Image (spheres, rainbow, N blue to C red):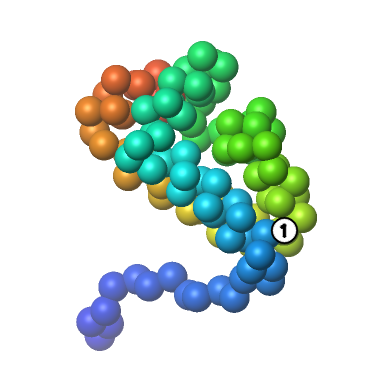
């Protein structure tokens, strides 16, 4: 009988420097002081928040993030996408409600 819940395996990061740079750009965009402006910028650009590659490609996470992301291997890119998706789910409920269209799945 299994007594512990699911635990994701720790995968080593192949390029820690580039990975950290992209992760820092995401953390900055979702920081409590910047998240409202970040969401407003996505709204003005008519982007959906879950379209990570498009948000990244439009420079919404900073001018260097896309280049750093593209330099990562597939595994590192996957971990960055998961980190981004987890970050957007941690936005305060009142902001998520205010920017409902960004979060909609349609």
Left or right, residue 24 beside residue 21 = left
Residue 38 place in picture, x, y as percent: 46, 29
Left or right, residue 31 beside residue 93 = right
Q: Is residue 35 above or below residue 20?
A: above
Visible in this render: residue 85?
A: no
Left or right, residue 42 beside residue 73 = left
Q: Which of 4 and 83 is in front in this view?
A: 83
Visible in this render: residue 44?
A: yes
Label tally = 1
Q: Which secondary structure, mark 1? A: loop
Residue at the spot 61% in from the left edge and 55% down from the top edge: 21
Residue 59 place in picture, x, y as percent: 65, 32
Q: In this view, does 57 lie above or below 9?
A: above
Question: In which quadrant of the rendered image does the N terminus lie?
Answer: bottom left
Residue 14 place in picture, x, y as percent: 68, 71
Q: Which of 105 and 18 is in front in this view?
A: 18
Quarter holding residue 51: top right
Q: Residue furthest bottom?
A: 1
Q: Nearer the viewer, residue 5 or 58?
A: 58
Quarter holding residue 78: bottom right
Left or right, residue 71 beside residue 89 = right
Residue 18 place in picture, x, y as percent: 67, 59
Q: Is residue 45 above or below residue 14?
A: above
Q: Provide the residue designation for mark 1.
A: 72
Residue at the spot 48% in from the left edge and 53% down from the top edge: 83
Q: In this view, does 63 lie above or below 105?
A: below
Residue at the spot 69% in from the left edge and 68% down from the top edge: 15
Local crowd size for mark 1, using a 10 Å CA cut-off: few (<14), some (14–19), many (≥20): many
């Amino acid at each position: 009988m299994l007594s512990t819940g699911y635990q994701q395996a720790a995968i080593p990061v192949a390029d820690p420097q580039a990975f950290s740079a992209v992760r820092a750009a995401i953390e900055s965009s979702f920081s409590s002081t910047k998240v409202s402006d970040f969401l407003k910028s996505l709204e003005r650009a008519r982007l959906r928040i879950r379209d990570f590659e498009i948000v990244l490609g439009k420079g919404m996470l900073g001018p260097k993030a896309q280049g750093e992301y593209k330099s990562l291997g597939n595994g590192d890119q996957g971990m960055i996408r998961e980190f981004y998706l987890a970050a957007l789910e941690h936005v305060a409920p009142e902001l998520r409600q205010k920017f409902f269209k960004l979060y909609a799945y349609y």
